[in-house]
Amino acid sequence: MDVCWSCVIVLGIAVYVFTQLLRFVFGDADLTLLWAEKFGSTPESKLRGKVVWITGASSGIGEELAYQFSALGARLVLSARRENELERIDVLINNGGRTQRSLFIDTDVDVYEALMELNYLGTISVTKQVLPHMMRRGSGIIATVSSVVGFVGAPLATGYSASKHAVQGFFKCLRTELTDYPNITISTICPGPVISSIVHNAFTEQLEKPVSTSSDQTHKMSTERCVHLILVGLANHVKEMWIAQQPFLLFCYLWQYVPTLAWYFTNILGKKRVQNFKAGLDADSGYFSKPKNKNT
């Protein structure tokens, strides 16, 4: 019996595309990261015993990173002010930073300066201290927790988004400067909505003005799942990770590959988000069918 090899190839491609589509629909991270989770190296095999410095480890993603690294048997550095401490760091996690909840038209310039100072310049400063030691040693991992708004646009976060765009631009350039150091990994982590206290500590329109109400977090990814995926990515030297549930993951792909369509949906949902914010509702409910009151 003759075999139609072209039919076999077409069928194989169709099965592959269908499988990838299913993984995307039910996924909570980009396909490269999900592939690494299923078929790549495990965090236990690659990160055990590493010396890890995590900035911003008091809550949220940073705190969970400390827990999960500790469970792997990693040695955590709580502060690294002396030269000998910097020399022994295998993994630097830049996680310090604050977000924003305010409209640009109402926000003082001081808020934008503070966001850039903390989120961008603070990250560069820490990296500047650690990288020379990794270069002398010829190996290391520098991972920075950015955000999906580091490459997409979102209302109420103009300063935060700008600082994260700056962070991602910086590390993309730095990665190209380190091509002579193939064993130094520069990894950018882009989470979507994750359960944490980051919104509670957000900048508002004035530097000293706190967020008056809390937002609903029932729709957000668990911190444990987010950090597990981060560790998988680090173990497999993934250069950029998108970690988000649907529909946020879809937005990442649209912004990357079909920006015109992404703008269309962003304008629709962004308008609703601003309307909810002005009405005193949870702004994030603009992404869902029923508004959720901020106080719930």
Image: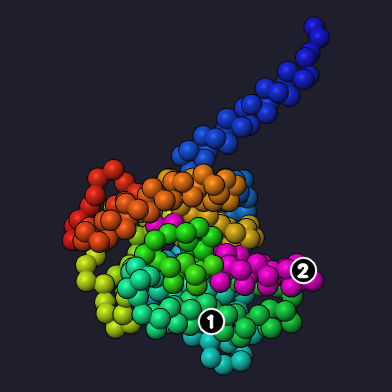
> Who's the residue at 68% across and 26% down the image?
12
- SS under mark 1: helix
**Horizontal side, residue 243 vs residue 215: left or right:** right
Q: Amino acid at mark 2?
A: Thr
Alpha-carbon span between mark 1 and mark 2: 23 Å
| Picture quarter with the N terminus | top right
Would residue 284 be visible to someone looking at this image? no
Q: Amino acid at mark 1?
A: Leu
Q: List x then y, in percent, for residue 259.
A: 55, 49
**Horizontal side, residue 283 vs residue 56: left or right:** left
Query: Which label was assigned to residue 121?
Result: 1
In depth, the one of 238 and 68 nearer the eye is 238
Magenta stretch: includes residue 191: yes
Local crowd at mark 1 within 10 Å, few (<14), some, or many (≥20)? Answer: some
What range of the chain is rendered magenta?
Answer: 166-193
**Horizontal side, residue 45 vs residue 279: left or right:** right
> Who's the residue at 29% across and 70% down the image?
200
